[in-house]
Image (cartoon, rainbow, N blue to C red):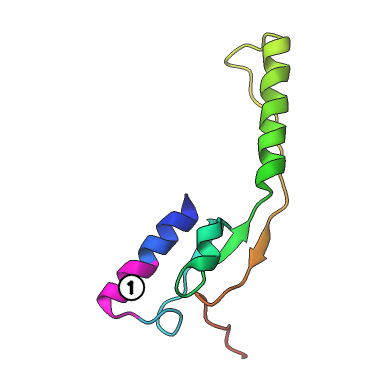
C-alpha cells in the first residue's frame, strides 16, 4: 500500500508544481509493478512477497493444527528487503 500512497504523493506534487526529485524525493515500500511505471519511476523498498505469503500460510496452518490460543504471541520473522533506486529520489550530496 505504501507504493500506492507514494504514487499519490507524486501526483499531488505534479498538481502543485513541485519537481520530483529536484525539490522533493519520494520513496515507497513494496515494489509493486506500478512503482516502476510511475512518472518518474518510484524509488521503493522491495520485499519478498511470495516468501512472505508462503510463511504466513505455513504459520496459519501450524496454528490451526496445534489449535493455538488467540492470545499466543506470533513468531517474529524478519525477511530481507532491498532498496530499488529509481528516478523519484535525488542523488545524495557529496560532502
Q: Nearer the viewer, residue 51 or 83?
A: 51
Q: Nearer the viewer, residue 57 or 22?
A: 57
Quadrant position of residue 12: bottom left
**On the rendered image, what quadrant is the C terminus found in?**
bottom right
Q: Position of residue 64 (x, y in %)?
A: 67, 13
Q: What is the residue that sits farthest to the top in this orientation?
A: 67
Quadrant position of residue 69: top right
Q: What is the residue that sits farthest to the bottom in this orientation?
A: 95
Residue at 60% over, 60% down: 45
Secondary element type, mark 1 = helix
Whether residue 76 appears in this view of the structure is: no
Magenta residues: mostly which secondary structure? Answer: helix
Residue at 66% over, 31% down: 56
Q: Position of residue 52 (x, y in %)?
A: 67, 40
Quadrant position of residue 54: top right
Residue at 42% over, 79% down: 20
Residue at 72% over, 41% down: 51
User: What range of the chain is rendered magenta?
Assistant: 10-18
Q: Position of residue 59 (x, y in %)?
A: 70, 25
Q: List the residue tagged with mark 1.
A: 13
Q: Is residue 48 magenta?
A: no
Q: What is the residue that sits farthest to the left in this orientation?
A: 16
Amino acid at each position: 500500500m505504501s507504493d500506492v500512497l507514494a504514487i499519490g504523493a507524486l501526483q499531488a506534487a505534479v498538481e502543485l508544481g513541485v519537481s520530483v526529485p529536484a525539490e522533493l524525493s519520494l520513496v515507497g515500500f513494496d515494489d509493486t509493478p506500478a512503482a516502476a511505471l510511475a512518472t518518474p519511476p518510484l524509488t521503493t523498498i522491495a520485499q519478498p512477497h511470495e516468501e512472505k505469503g508462503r510463511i504466513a500460510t505455513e504459520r496459519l496452518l501450524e496454528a490451526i493444527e496445534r489449535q493455538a490460543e488467540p492470545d499466543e504471541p506470533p513468531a517474529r520473522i524478519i525477511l530481507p528487503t532491498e532498496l530499488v533506486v529509481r528516478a523519484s529520489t535525488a542523488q545524495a550530496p557529496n560532502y
